[in-house]
Image: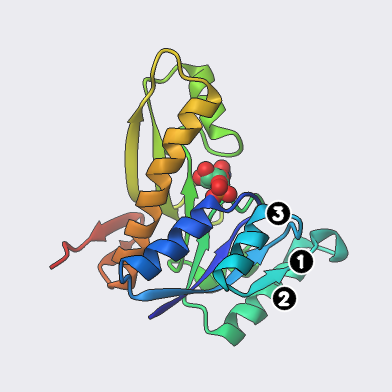
Amino acid sequence: PLKIAVFASGSGSNFQALVEAIREQAIPATVSLLVCDKPAARVVQRAEALGVPAFLFDPKAYASREAYEEEIVGRLHEEGVELIVLAGYMRLITATLVEPYYGRMINIHPALLPAFPGVRAIRQALEYGVKLAGVTVHFVDGGMDSGPIIAQQAIEVRDDDTEDTLAERVHAVEHELLPRTVRWIAEGRVTLNDRKVTIRPGD
Ligand code: GAR
């Protein structure tokens, strides 16, 4: 099975959905590590409950972003991690991580990229007044939410949506789209060529 490390900073609902989907839907993968920069985050409790080991670190204890990323890369190599999944990891990533893992690191973002990159994407979309919100899963490159897109799903915005009501539907879509994308990758069906991603149909 494909060895995965999930990076998360917050609630970890996507982390849990991915671990459960892998176990229940026979996805040929395993989440072998949680990497978390917020030791008090709820995702840490979820990892414990699910029996997934965690690498916790405090960014303030390091001289630079590169310094803690070097330590993370060392741990990923030790574990033999083949795919990194960023699921609500609220930190910028540098070349220290991107270079060794380009094409093997994906991110889930709660908007239809390239619209609304960065933080609070759901609120940005509501404030803009779009009629279609959505979710994107993409390969991570050096930019902010800018890498090659693997999968997207649109969600209709309702006139009475608030950030909370829309976020609830966004999360429901995320919890399906992320495991589906990981399955495609684990089954070796995803090809990255320049910026273009193609998915070979399943059997
Ligand atoms: C998710 O909605 C994810 O798309 C978003 O953070 C949330 C984490 O939720 N990521 C970003 O905004 C990245 N720019 P979770 O902790 O419950 O999985």
Q: SS class of the residue under badge 3?
A: loop
Residue 41 tag number: 3
Would you place residue 169 above or below residue 32 in this image?
above
Quarter of the figure that contains the N terminus: bottom left
- Give residue 186's position: percent from left, percent from top: 33, 72
Which of the two discs, 3 and 2, sits closer to the camera? Answer: 3
Q: CA distance from mark 3 to mark 1?
A: 12 Å
- Give residue 164's position: percent from left, percent from top: 54, 28
Question: Looking at this view, is 200 or 11 the one in front?
Answer: 11
Question: Looking at this view, is 139 or 10 the one in front?
Answer: 10
Would you place residue 20 above or below residue 9 in this image?
below
Which of the two labelled residues, at mark 3 and mark 2, occupies the earlier sequence position? 3
Which of the two discs, 3 and 1, sits closer to the camera? Answer: 3
Residue labelled 3 has its Cβ within 8 Å of some atom of ligand 1: no
**Residue in view at x 66 percent, y 81 percent:** 74
Categorize mark 1 by other alpha carbons within 10 Å: few (<14), some (14-19), many (20+).
some
Which of the two labelled residues, at mark 3 and mark 1, occupies the earlier sequence position? 3
Residue 71 tag number: 2
Q: CA distance from mark 3 to mark 2?
A: 20 Å
- Residue kind at label 3, given as amino acid type: Ala
Q: Is residue 190 left or right of residue 137?
A: left
Task: Indicate the colouring scheme.
Answer: rainbow
Residue carrying label 1: 57
- Residue kind at label 1, given as amino acid type: Phe
Q: Is residue 27 left or right of residue 47?
A: left
**Residue in view at x 53 percent, y 54 percent:** 87
Which of the two discs, 1 and 2, sits closer to the camera? Answer: 1
